[in-house]
């Protein structure tokens, strides 16, 4: 068994047939079939049930797929680390929730990356649960998350900001002059929200339920630009963090009567390889302290 055979096996699993897998791997179908047969012969088990329309994993194949992923991920991680050490070039793979990206990343560049030209940033914008999963598998080095509770015992964190969530409105909206709003005031408004599994959506759903209000959702989107355009054209009411729209002259932020404040933290897996770039970014935020 070798890593190439395992990668071939994983590709067949992903494609479900040898023809597509061979095309994706840029090898001949007989070569791919031979590699799979070699694995089966070495292990003494059938990994696939061969069918007319494709390949179906056996129970033994399912077991190998699960175990092989950690091996190939570890190999990819080792290769990346050693190439970076050899070249002196460091790429920081950073996870960011979509709602934070447009606000956070320019500040991250201005405050940190422009002073570290040896570092490059590779960004994954995904919801919090996906980010934490990839962090645990070390497919990300660091991540920024939004939270109200501790991040978990298997992760380390440094708080970077406190943000306040509230209602965003066009300046022409009838509610724009209010000092604060409760959720009953939004009962008849059309709303633009983040997708259901996003952290902010979960917090808002709890508040709507507590107020006994069924929200009238016009649409859900993870694209902040789309949300802002709907709000500016008075087609919907949105929800964002005050710090993200305070420079936009067309928009008004109105806080909730019961404030909704969240923390932004930089997190990382405790027991993992820490590159020089990771250490620098962590040191930067520890020295800077939380910002509002």
Image (cartoon, rainbow, N blue to C red):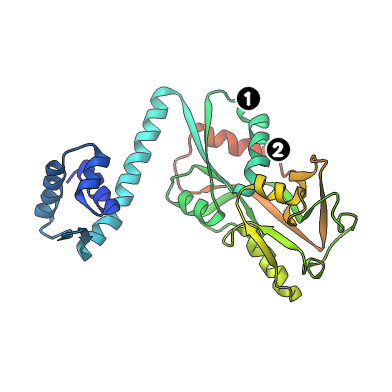
What x and y, as percent, mark residue 197? 56, 61
**Going 46% across and 50% down the picture, which residue do you hit?**
134
**Along the line of sight, the residue nearer the viewer: 104 or 289:** 104
Left or right, residue 111 beside residue 182: left
Proximity of marks 2 and 1: CB atoms separated by less than 8 Å: no
Rendered-image quadrant of the C terminus:
top right
Residue 27 tag number: none
First in residue order: circle 2 vs circle 1: 1
**Along the line of sight, the residue nearer the viewer: 192 or 135:** 192
**Going 64% across and 53% down the picture, which residue do you hit?**
146
Which residue, as the protein is rendered here, is positioned at the far bottom? 212
Q: Mark 2 points at which residue?
A: 288
Mark 1 secondary-structure assignment = helix
Residue 115 tag number: 1
Tell me the crowding category of disc 2: few under 14, some 14 to 19, or many 20 or more residues within 10 angstroms, Cα based: few
What x and y, as percent, mark residue 59? 22, 65
Q: In this view, does 28 lie above or below 13?
A: above
**Along the line of sight, the residue nearer the viewer: 204 or 185:** 185
Left or right, residue 115 beside residue 56: right
Tell me the crowding category of disc 1: few under 14, some 14 to 19, or many 20 or more residues within 10 angstroms, Cα based: few
Q: Quadrant of residue 288?
A: top right
Mark 2 secondary-structure assignment = helix
Q: Quadrant of residue 110?
A: top right
Distance from the alpha carbon under mark 2 to that under mark 1: 15 Å
């Amino acid at each position: 068994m070798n890593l190439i055979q395992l990668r071939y096996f994983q590709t067949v699993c992903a494609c479900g047939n040898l023809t597509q897998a061979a095309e994706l791997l840029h090898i001949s179908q007989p070569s791919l079939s031979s590699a799979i047969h070699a694995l089966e012969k070495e292990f003494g088990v059938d990994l696939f049930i061969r069918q007319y329309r494709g390949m179906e994993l056996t129970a033994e194949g399912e077991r190998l797929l699960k175990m092989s992923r950690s091996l190939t991920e570890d190999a990819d991680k080792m290769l990346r680390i050693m190439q970076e050490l050899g070249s002196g070039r460091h790429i920081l793979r950073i996870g960011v929730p979509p709602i934070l990206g447009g606000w956070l990343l320019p500040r991250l560049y201005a405050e940190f990356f422009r002073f570290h030209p040896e570092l490059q940033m590779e960004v994954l914008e995904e919801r919090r649960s996906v980010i934490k999963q990839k962090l645990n598998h070390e497919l990300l080095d660091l991540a920024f998350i939004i939270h109200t509770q501790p991040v978990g015992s298997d992760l380390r964190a440094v708080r970077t900001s406190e943000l306040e969530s509230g209602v965003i409105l066009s300046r022409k909206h009838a509610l724009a002059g209010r000092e604060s709003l409760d959720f009953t005031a939004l009962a008849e408004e059309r709303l633009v929200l983040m997708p259901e599994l996003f952290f902010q959506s979960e917090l808002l759903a709890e508040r709507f339920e507590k107020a006994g209000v069924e929200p009238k959702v016009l649409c859900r989107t993870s694209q902040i630009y789309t949300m802002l355009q709907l709000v500016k054209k008075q087609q919907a009411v949105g929800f964002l963090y005050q710090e993200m729209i305070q420079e936009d002259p067309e928009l008004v932020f109105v806080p909730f009567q019961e404030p909704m404040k969240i923390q932004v933290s930089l997190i990382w897996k405790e027991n993992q390889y820490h590159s020089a770039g990771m250490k620098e970014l962590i040191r930067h935020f520890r020295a800077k302290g939380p910002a509002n």
